[in-house]
Image (cartoon, grey):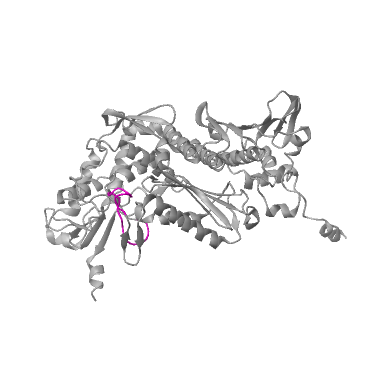
């Protein structure tokens, strides 16, 4: 009898709303930028033509979005925080013709379940508005209030009641970068709306409503963009493709300025992005990325926008045709406006009708597919060693010289014993012949008594610079060369935010940088031995490389910045070195604490024994 009663009891039960809302929030609200996106979607759908965004502590403390849209009445204010309550879907058919950015009714409930929300709203024509407070999904206060037309939503202390989620947030610079990306998408998709963005009392953007798209891009990413942009548009019966492309000379070393929209909704599509980037391939250096914003206007019935929890991806009914058309339109736009040469990948030849009217002659028209390799000249003066950062020789440096001599020079004593075993350092002993050889101006080769030693000159130099950069950040007086004329550099809001976070480490590394207003910095000094005139390029490349390392390698800020500096300033493959320079590079490599790996654990040295070589001739 007891067994029957036990088995008849149900083990399945419904979750309480406070738990189910937090689970749903895990899909919809992943970080502060997710909150910004949902609030911006609501403000745009409300018909606002002016939106103000206030951010504190990268969204951890406060995210506030204020709009002058249609507002809400007393009944709707409470109802908008209910799960799946929406004004935009009335039937199943509506799902197949969605034109609004929000439609599922999950956002406000999810946000309220993991934060402290204060909402103020008033409809035009109403005498009084209302103020509503809800913390962790629990109503705190609802009262009439004197507020302006529209809606203001203040989200405080995100994940305050889910501390485990809060611990997984990244650095302020990373979280703010994601917020800025979200705002940039909204501002590009809706140039008819004015946006004001304030972060920790600093005004980041003040974008006027109705700006031409080129002016809006220049206002967000820098004045230098405006002269390097072209607009294009191509209409078909199925889809209209329009947008803005950058001159291939306007590139960055990291991704982040490639935007795709369908019916003004931002979306991600890896293959489509790859297709557009591949059109730029013949004129881009390795890891160089242009700016583009491409808009697809298509019948909502031909695209499904409900295929991703955060609505970041879409599904086209005829995806192949969309991609093919985008590729054709982008290629045509570049050809017409910039006289881009057509590359015959079979014959490896570049053709163009008018070389003088197109790009300047310093562009490298490479044959073959894929991104071209480094364009650094193989000529020029001798490479300076040690590295781009100078510091006094230490005991470790002298020890490295001894290790290098064990590898590359004949030691005194019995040569017969040397021939039988490697040196005490574990490295093969070099013969009396002191020559080095370069293979394709990229690898240093030297004969040893028991085989062949090959060194990757770029990886080796990165290791040297990396360790010396770390040493500089620990030094009480970093080595800095003051510039005769200070260099002013204009950065994007994202880069400037990152620069502020890393400013202290950069100063210890030897940079003398003054932070100005309006996303501008002044470079007064740089680490010793950085080429004069290359200061801005080094700084920008370091910031881009630093961002690329985030989330990929488990390194702290100081180590990531040292890697970024080394990656930018190390000699590239393709640089010819003299015998003396090769020997100097090797001596310093063995002065490092870890000479066998570059900062990202790629090998710097490869040894091939005689036995391995002989086996290939059998």
**What segment is highlighted magenta in the picture?**
354-371
Let me know if residue 524 is in the magenta part: no
Q: Nearer the viewer, residue 558 or 570?
A: 570
Q: Residue, x 16% and y 59% (percent of image)?
A: 418
Asked if one can make out residue 287 in the rendered structure from this viewpoint, the answer is: no
The quadrant of the picture occupied by the C terminus is bottom left
The quadrant of the picture occupied by the N terminus is bottom right
Query: In terms of secondary structure, what is the magenta stretch mainly?
Result: loop
Q: Position of residue 370 (x, y in %)?
A: 37, 59
Asked if one can make out residue 279 in the rendered structure from this viewpoint, the answer is: yes
Q: Report how many numbered discs are placed on residues in the image.
A: 0
Determine the image quadrant of residue 504.
Answer: top left
Query: Position of 379 compared to 188: left or right?
Result: left
Vertical position of residue 321 compared to residue 597: above or below: below
Q: Residue, x 63% and y 54% (percent of image)?
A: 299
Q: Residue, x 32% and y 44% (percent of image)?
A: 568
Vertical position of residue 539 compared to residue 418: above or below: above
Q: Position of residue 599 (x, y in %)?
A: 35, 47
Q: Nearer the viewer, residue 211 or 140?
A: 211
Residue reaching furthest to the top: 146
Query: Position of 76 compared to 40: left or right?
Result: right
Residue reaching furthest to the right: 1
Let me know if residue 370 is in the magenta part: yes
Q: Nearer the viewer, residue 58 or 4?
A: 58
Q: Position of residue 474 (x, y in %)?
A: 33, 33
Q: Nearer the viewer, residue 37 or 148?
A: 148
Q: Position of residue 92 (x, y in %)?
A: 74, 54
Vertical position of residue 600 compared to residue 504: above or below: below
Residue reaching furthest to the bottom: 618
């Amino acid at each position: 009898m007891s067994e029957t009663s036990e088995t008849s009891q149900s083990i399945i039960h419904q979750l309480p709303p406070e738990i189910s809302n937090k689970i749903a929030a895990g899909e919809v609200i992943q970080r502060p930028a997710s909150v910004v996106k949902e609030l911006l979607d609501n403000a745009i759908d409300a018909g606002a033509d002016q939106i103000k965004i206030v951010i504190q502590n990268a969204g951890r403390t406060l995210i506030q979005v204020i709009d002058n849209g249609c507002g809400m009445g007393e009944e709707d204010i409470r109802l908008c925080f209910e799960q799946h309550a929406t004004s935009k879907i009335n039937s199943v058919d509506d799902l197949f013709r969605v034109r609004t950015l929000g439609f599922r009714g999950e956002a406000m409930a999810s946000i309220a379940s993991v934060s402290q929300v204060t909402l103020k709203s008033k409809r035009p024509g109403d005498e009084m508005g209302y103020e509503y407070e809800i913390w962790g999904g629990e109503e705190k206060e609802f009262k009439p209030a004197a507020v302006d037309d529209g809606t203001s939503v203040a989200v405080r202390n995100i994940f305050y009641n889910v501390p485990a989620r809060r611990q997984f947030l990244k650095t302020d610079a990373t979280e703010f970068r994601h917020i800025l990306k979200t705002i940039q998408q909204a501002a590009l998709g809706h140039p008819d709306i004015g946006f004001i963005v304030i972060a920790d009392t600093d005004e980041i953007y003040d974008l006027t409503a109705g700006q031409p798209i080129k002016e809006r891009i220049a206002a967000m990413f820098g004045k230098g963009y405006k002269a390097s942009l072209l607009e294009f548009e191509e209409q078909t019966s199925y889809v209209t493709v329009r947008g803005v492309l950058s001159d291939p000379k306007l590139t960055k070393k990291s991704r982040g300025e490639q935007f795709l929209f369908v019916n003004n909704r931002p979306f991600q599509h890896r293959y489509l992005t790859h297709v557009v980037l591949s059109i730029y391939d013949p004129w881009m250096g390795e890891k160089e990325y242009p700016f583009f914003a491409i808009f697809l206007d298509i019948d909502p019935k031909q695209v499904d926008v409900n295929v991703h929890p955060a609505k970041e991806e879409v599904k086209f009914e005829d995806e192949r045709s969309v991609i093919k058309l985008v590729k054709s339109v982008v290629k045509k736009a570049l050809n017409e406006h910039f006289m881009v040469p057509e590359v015959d990948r079979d014959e490896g030849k570049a053709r163009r009708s008018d070389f003088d009217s197109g790009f300047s002659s310093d562009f490298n028209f490479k044959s073959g597919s894929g991104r071209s390799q480094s364009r650094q000249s193989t000529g020029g003066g001798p490479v300076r060693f040690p590295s781009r950062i100078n510091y006094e020789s230490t005991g470790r440096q002298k020890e490295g010289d001894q290790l290098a001599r064990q590898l590359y020079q004949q030691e005194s004593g019995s040569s017969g014993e040397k021939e039988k075993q490697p040196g005490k350092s574990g490295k093969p002993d070099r013969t009396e012949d002191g020559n080095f050889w370069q293979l394709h101006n990229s690898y240093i080769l030297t004969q040893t008594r028991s085989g062949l030693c090959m060194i990757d000159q770029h990886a080796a130099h990165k290791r040297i610079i990396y360790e010396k950069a770390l040493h500089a950040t620990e030094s009480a007086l970093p080595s800095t060369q003051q510039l005769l004329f200070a260099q002013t550099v204009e950065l994007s809001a994202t880069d400037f935010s990152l620069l502020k976070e890393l400013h202290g480490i950069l100063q210890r590394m030897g940079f003398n940088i003054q932070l100005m207003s309006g996303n501008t910095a002044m470079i007064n000094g740089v680490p010793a031995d950085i080429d004069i005139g290359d200061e801005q390029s080094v700084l920008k490349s370091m910031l881009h490389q630093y961002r690329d390392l985030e989330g990929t390698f488990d390194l702290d800020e100081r180590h990531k910045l040292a890697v970024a500096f080394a990656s930018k300033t190390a000699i590239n493959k393709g640089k010819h070195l003299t015998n003396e320079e090769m020997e100097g590079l090797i001596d310093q490599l063995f002065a490092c604490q870890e000479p066998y790996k570059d900062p990202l654990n790629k090998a710097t040295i490869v040894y091939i024994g005689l036995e391995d070589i002989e086996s290939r001739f059998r």
